[in-house]
Image (cartoon, grey):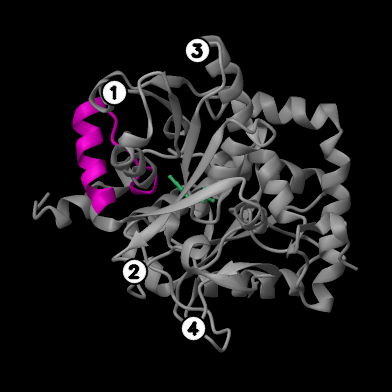
Amino acid sequence: MPNSLTKFGEYGGQFAPEILMCALEELEEAFNEVLSDEKFWDELNYYLREFAGRPTPLYRAENLSKELNTNIYLKREDLVHGGAHKLNNTLGQALLAKKMGKNRIIAETGAGQHGVATAIAGAMLGLRIEVYMGTEDIERQRLNVFRMKLLGAKLNPVSSGSKTLKDAVNESMRDWVARVVDTYYLIGSIVGPHPYPTMVREFQRVIGKETKEQIMKKEGKLPTAIVACVGGGSNAIGTFYEFLDDDDVELYCVEAGGKGVDTKEHGASLYAGSDGVLHGMYSKLLQDKYGQIQTSYSLAPGLDYPGVGPELTHLYESGRVKVDVITDDEALYAFQRFSELEGIIPALESAHALAYVMKSSDKFDKDDVIVVNLSGRGDKDVDLVAKLMGTRL
Ligand SMILES: *Cc1c(COP(=O)(O)O)cnc(C)c1O
């Protein structure tokens, strides 16, 4: 039975079929056990350090700071092995799966980033990985499909529904129901039924823990504001969590405005969505008046999801985090401008957070300290951006 611990305010919960409840209970129990197991965290921290490259730097963006006449710091999750924050979570969960004696891991993926991050963790820990991916996405993301193959993962194409991420999630849940005994379902963001939102947050919290220590060392004070892009919300909550009780630190979520929030082509679930149930959770979603899930859209594949984690929804409703949107065009401009300014090509997702800071510079003055979580690097997006700029590679 869902209890208050499974929820964030009224959001979250376990809207899962009866047959999954045992699996969720088993998972919750195992997770609660490792939460206080020093050996588990020692081992995870070993891999985070030696394999993933943590801690990541908190880098002062000198040129952008000068241009905006304020102080901008970048939390360099783009330097994590694999090129994004995603490995923090997949390493944690893969290690948990191993502890639980599950030697087959399944994962869903949209653009393939979470599939690749799961395949990396699985290969390193010697676990079997199967990734569900919509056939539409397989067509669009050949590079990541091949990466997964190189890393030894098996691809399970999904041709139901819109043949994209939300259908891949549905298919993964179906698989899990059928093979609960030997299978672990590794979810890629702070979404899904309890305990996933809490668990993924705990594995991503390392971003904010490091950030707090680093900013105190460099500036001797807490930041004025922290900015992160939001797809499902894992890099945002991971960066914010350590600062939730520091009321003076403003927390900004930046969602995908796509072609405009007044069109149907965007991914702004907090900004423009409404309450409902998707993938086992009660949260804010993009849905029509009958509760049918709408397809989301963003140029940034990681922001292209029609829901958002229940904890962020709760923090938004309670006023602790603020939300704004950035369109494709604004993100594309920031992608280019930031690259030439700082010598770092950001992921298109992260470019949304950067675009927000560039656009809002009048909000910040010269003594303010702004931390932007640079969730990933942009190598994966270079092909698409070249095409949009009319350049043939
Ligand atoms: C997947 C991804 C995101 C979005 O996922 P969250 O769970 O919202 O963090 C953001 N940035 C990058 C680089 C990603 O790969």
Q: Which residue is mark 3?
A: 219
Q: Nearer the viewer, mark 2 or mark 1?
A: 1
User: Which residues are the magenta region?
Assistant: 330-350
Distance between the alpha carbons at the discs numbered 3 and 1: 16 Å
Q: Which residue is mark 4?
A: 161
Q: Nearer the viewer, mark 3 or mark 2?
A: 3
SS of the residue under disc 4: loop
- The kind of residue on which mark 1 rests is Asn
Q: Nearer the viewer, mark 1 or mark 4?
A: 1
Residue at 84%, 69% (x, y): give it: 21
Query: Residue 145: in sight, yes or no?
Result: no
Residue at 73%, 63% (x, y): give it: 193
Q: Which residue is mark 1?
A: 69
Residue closest to the eye, 106 or 206? 206
Question: Is residue 23 positioned above or below 114 on the image?
Answer: below
Q: Which residue is mark 2?
A: 139
- The kind of residue on which mark 4 rests is Gly
- The kind of residue on which mark 2 rests is Glu
